[in-house]
Image (cartoon, grey):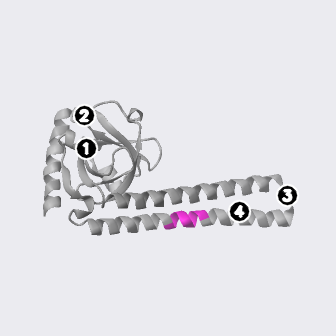
Amino acid sequence: MQARRFGYQVSPRNAMSSRGMTRNVDTARRTDTRLHEASVVSTAAWVAAVAAVVFLWWVVGPEPWLFLAGGGAFILAAMVSSEAGKTRKAFEAGMALLGEHPWQVWPCRLEGTGVTGRHRILLLAPDGSAARSYVARVPESVWYGMTDGIGALWVCGDLRFLVVMAKPGGTPLWIAHPEPASAASTAPADPTLIADLARTAGRAAVEDWFT
């Protein structure tokens, strides 16, 4: 495991064995349900728009603008529905990881991607370089609460694939998807700061894992 090779703290049991994780997962599941319901409402609105266009087509005839409006609404409805389904599937896959893999404590750096609501998370090696890079919708409390975008996170899963991330303590939880490390910023962080973050976060994590 890469975290162990770097000397970072790894929990002795699976992530669900940590203190308060049942409550943390319940909170994450409620949040995911709210987001899914919002996506369903959005899809329904676009489907209603398609139905309205079909009705107008029947009333006024096959006008070109109706064809364009109907086609656009249908495509948007399909895109929203597909994205909602993928997000729900990824969430359930992530929750399953919590019962299979331990927590790993990683120093990290958060960056924007230029896309609203989409962030990059760099897991940092001891020399400050990016060992792994992920993209995710990081909760606002984490994004705005991490000074200068440098801090520590808990990570659960095989680092080659989808993982679960959390603020130290196990909440909030979110899903992150891997991307090529070359897509991230190449400016390394201060190794001394990384060592201090790993040491401090590791000590704090042990209290959650063993008490």
Residue identifier under label 2: 128
- Point out the frontmost of discs 4 and 1: 1
Q: Is residue 49 magenta?
A: no
Residue depicted at x 85% and y 63%: 60
Query: Magenta residues, as a range?
Result: 37-43
- Give the secondary structure at mark 4: helix
- Point out the frontmost of discs 2 and 1: 1
Q: Position of residue 3 (x, y in %)?
A: 23, 43
Q: Is residue 38 magenta?
A: yes
- Residue 54 placement: quadrant: bottom right
Side of 38 where 193 appears, left or right: left
Residue identifier under label 4: 50
Q: For the stretch drawn in magenta, what is the main secondary structure?
A: helix
**C-alpha separation, residue under disc 4 versus residue under disc 3:** 14 Å
Above or below for 189 versus 136 = above
- Give the secondary structure at mark 3: loop
